[in-house]
Amino acid sequence: MKTVYLQNLRKELDATDDSFAASCCKKLGIPKDALLKLRIVRQALDARKKQDIFYCIHAELTLTDAAAKRVLHDPRLRAEPVSETEPEPFAFGTMQPEGRIIVVGLGPAGLFAALTLAENGYRPLVIERGRPIGERVKDVETYWSGSIREPDPDSNVAFGEGGAGTFSDGKLTTRIRDPHIDGVLSELIKSGAPEEIAYLAKPHIGTDRLRTVVGELRRRIEAAGGEVRFSARLEDVRTVDGRITAACVCEGDRREWEPCAALLLAIGHGARDTARMLFLKGVAMAPKAFAIGVRAEHPQSLINESQYGPMANHPRLGAAEYRLTARSGERGVYTFCMCPGGQVVASASGREQVVVNGMSNFARDGKNANAAVVVQITPEDFGTHPLDGLRYLDKLERDAFLLGGGDGTAPASTVGAFLRNETPKPSCAVTPTYRPGVRYTRLSDCLPDFVTAGVRDGLKAFGRQLKGYDMEDAVLTAVESRTSSPLRILRDTAMESVSHKGLYPIGEGAGYAGGIVSAAVDGRKAAEAVMRIYAPVP
């Protein structure tokens, strides 16, 4: 019995597990009973030919010795033997920590840093300025319903258990290549995510399932000895000889200094007040490039037909996705965080802000598709001071707030009116999903000129790449401003701050990740960096 690895196996859309196994045996020229086990490693949809859409499969097949010999010696198949290798044992540190190991933030980076520490005996303290998932969902819904004009400053789409990713499509795609990825996906599955995320080329969990997964990850942290405090904010840090020695934790009117040996900073890129506090404390940081723009909404049926042609209504295909890129002069323009069958959501985290983002449920069964259409922006556009990007975004989000009417309503336009720079009328084809509502107006009144020009160039180019993308009545909602952090908290190769020993800046807020998986990997690696120094807590 041997296991072989094969790529580019074809699986028809209507195939069952048994029929796919049978087709594999036929392709390999072996009897059905020679295939003992089949494990899909990767499954991607091949829709290049609209008349012939199928799954492209990479798989590990456990075969009888005779069948494996035949397959491995067939030059047409390019099969590879699979060998089991034992991972090297982790080398734990021996120093006893003076004070607690503290994780700040319970988004993907903080969750996986805390989980790794807790399950290895380090009993971390986790502080999260927002509320537990159930309370947080209620707070967000109150804001979206229009019952209040502004979001709760500490319990909103940016702050609370699960971080900003909780109100998203729950995408798990990433461009990084790291051996920790499989471990992150495994932990998500262990906490309730569907098993298919381990092999799908474009896995997602959906905001509805992700909330359950996030809650289970936190329960596992607590069960392993970690302590999680909600409605607890990092207000200050204390240093001795350039090393973090204590963190001031603010819980309501109570402030307490917690001695700490290591401070893992997973604050997310919405915590601008914390970033400013750290800058005043001398923590080294620098401005970085990011992107800003709008959210585009189209009928999901249009996207399906453009991507899948005559097979658009096949029940196995579901809601189609897209990713589009273009140029506007020297700047890149691209779609970001595409949410099939989703909705545009109000993502402000403070007073006098309008911020838009997108999310989908696991089923992706909404009528509209949405995605950010964003334009690259660099420090040359907003300033070279580390906090200039934050100031730039503060103004941009306030301008959108005022243009929307000053009540949380978002400014919006149809694509046609935006391209012609006209005052728009309400769309006749797309009902905006943003709550508490939109106000149709000229988006150029709140966007920088180069962003307006870039989005226009992008929409025209995208209309040539994906039929119907530049449709007259598609809806644009502003402003998409939180694609990534506008600053980077500088760290060395050991993931430690270059200016403050014991401080580990991690995740999206520190400028080192761009999604759920990359942030989780970053948190896990930072935890391991701490574990290489300190021994588990007795």
Image (tube, rainbow, N blue to C red):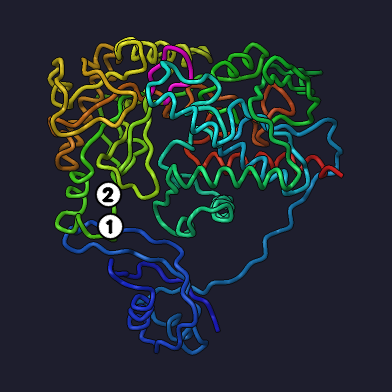
**Horizontal relation, residue 345 to residue 214: left or right:** left
Q: Nearer the viewer, residue 62 or 312?
A: 312
What amino acid is at disc 1?
Leu
Q: Label the magenta part by its dominant secondary structure.
A: loop
- Place of residue 533 in the rendered image (x, y in percent of width and height, measured from the top left): 78, 40
> Does residue 283 appear to the left or right of 16 in the view shown?
right
Pointer 2 with pointer 1, Cβ within 8 A: yes
Dot 2: element: loop
Q: Quadrant of residue 22?
A: bottom left
Type of amino acid under label 2: Ala
Q: Position of residue 366 (x, y in %)?
A: 29, 43
In the image, residue 262 above or below residue 31: above
Mark 2, other Cα within 10 Å: few <14 / some 14–19 / many ≥20: many
Which of the image's four quarters has the N terminus? bottom right
Q: Quadrant of residue 356?
A: top left
Instruction: Name the residue at 39% across, 68% down.
Output: 7
Does 49 sit left or right of 517 as displayed?
left
Q: Tell me the residue at 30%/42% (across/down).
A: 323
Residue 355 versus residue 447: which sits nearer the camera?
355
Q: Position of residue 315 (x, y in %)?
A: 26, 60
> Left or right: 89 with respect to 335?
right
Q: Which residues are magenta?
A: 347-355
Count of residue discs: 2
Question: Is-magenta flag for residue 349?
Answer: yes
Instruction: Please give the label number shown on residue 320.
Output: 2
Residue that badge 1 annotates: 317
Q: From this view, report whether residue 182 is shown above or below residue 377.
A: below
